């Protein structure tokens, strides 16, 4: 009896894996003997279109620093050159007049998307768009 139960379980496992394999094939659903399905679905012989694939989501660019509208107050250890580089990496060009203010935020002016704007860099390394006061 034990051999029969084991043999039946083995056969069921093989059959289930073949069906799963057949259904995971692109295109149409088929049977274990015709994995591609012969161009029809199992139920009614209706042709089945291949599954549409969604466009790949673009991964966030880890080389670009985050851009925010409100800087954080804190002791900023970035040098002027590092602040300029992070701003440029965030998409700003022609960064000018950088000065570190009393709250530790590097502030200046730069070009972005064709217009000149205020830009800053807080101690976290977040690039700040505009001239907003610090968050305390």
Image (cartoon, rainbow, N blue to C red):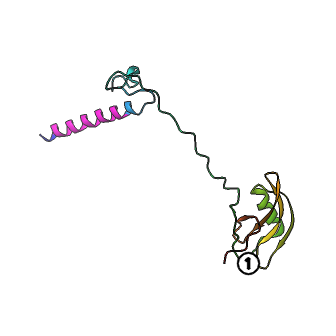
Q: Secondary structure at mark 1?
A: loop
Q: Find residue 84 and report its horizontal and vertical position in percent.
A: 81, 63
- Which residue does the numbered mark 1 point to in the structure image? 75
Horizontal side of residue 117 vs 11, given as left or right: right
**Residue at the (82%, 55%) spot, across then down:** 115
Q: Nearer the viewer, residue 13 or 95?
A: 95
Horizontal side of residue 55 vs 38, given as left or right: right
Residue 12 in the magenta stretch? The answer is: yes
Which of the 4 image quarters holds residue 31? top left
**Residue at the (67%, 75%) spot, across then down:** 135
- Secondary structure predominantly adopted by residues drawn in magenta: helix
Q: Nearer the viewer, residue 115 or 33?
A: 115
Horizontal side of residue 52 vs 42, given as left or right: right
Specify the farthest residue to the left: 1
Q: Find residue 102 and report its horizontal and vertical position in percent.
A: 79, 79
Q: Is residue 73 above or below residue 17?
A: below
Q: Find residue 42 and report its horizontal and vertical position in percent.
A: 33, 26
Quadrant of the drawing holding the C terminus: bottom right
Residue 131 in the magenta stretch? The answer is: no
Which of the 4 image quarters holds residue 74? bottom right
Quadrant of the drawing holding the N terminus: top left
**Residue at the (38%, 26%) spot, across then down:** 35
For the record, the magenta segment spans 3-20
Q: Find residue 108 and report its horizontal and vertical position in percent.
A: 83, 66
Badge 1: how crowded within 10 Å, few (<14), some, or many (20+)?
A: few
Specify the farthest residue to the right: 97
Q: Is residue 124 above or below residue 52?
A: below
**Residue at the (67%, 53%) spot, across then down:** 61
């Amino acid at each position: 009896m034990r051999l029969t139960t084991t043999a039946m379980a083995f056969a069921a496992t093989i059959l289930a894996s073949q069906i799963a394999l057949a259904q995971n094939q692109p295109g149409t659903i088929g049977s274990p003997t015709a994995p591609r399905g012969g161009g029809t679905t199992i139920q009614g012989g209706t042709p089945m279109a291949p599954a549409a694939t969604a466009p790949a989501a673009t991964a966030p660019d880890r080389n670009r620093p985050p851009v925010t509208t409100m800087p954080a107050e804190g002791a900023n250890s970035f040098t002027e050159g590092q602040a300029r580089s992070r701003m440029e990496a965030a998409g700003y060009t022609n960064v000018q007049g950088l000065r570190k203010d009393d709250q530790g935020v590097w502030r200046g002016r730069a070009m972005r998307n064709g217009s000149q704007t205020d830009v800053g860099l807080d101690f976290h390394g977040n690039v700040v768009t505009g001239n907003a006061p610090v968050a305390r």
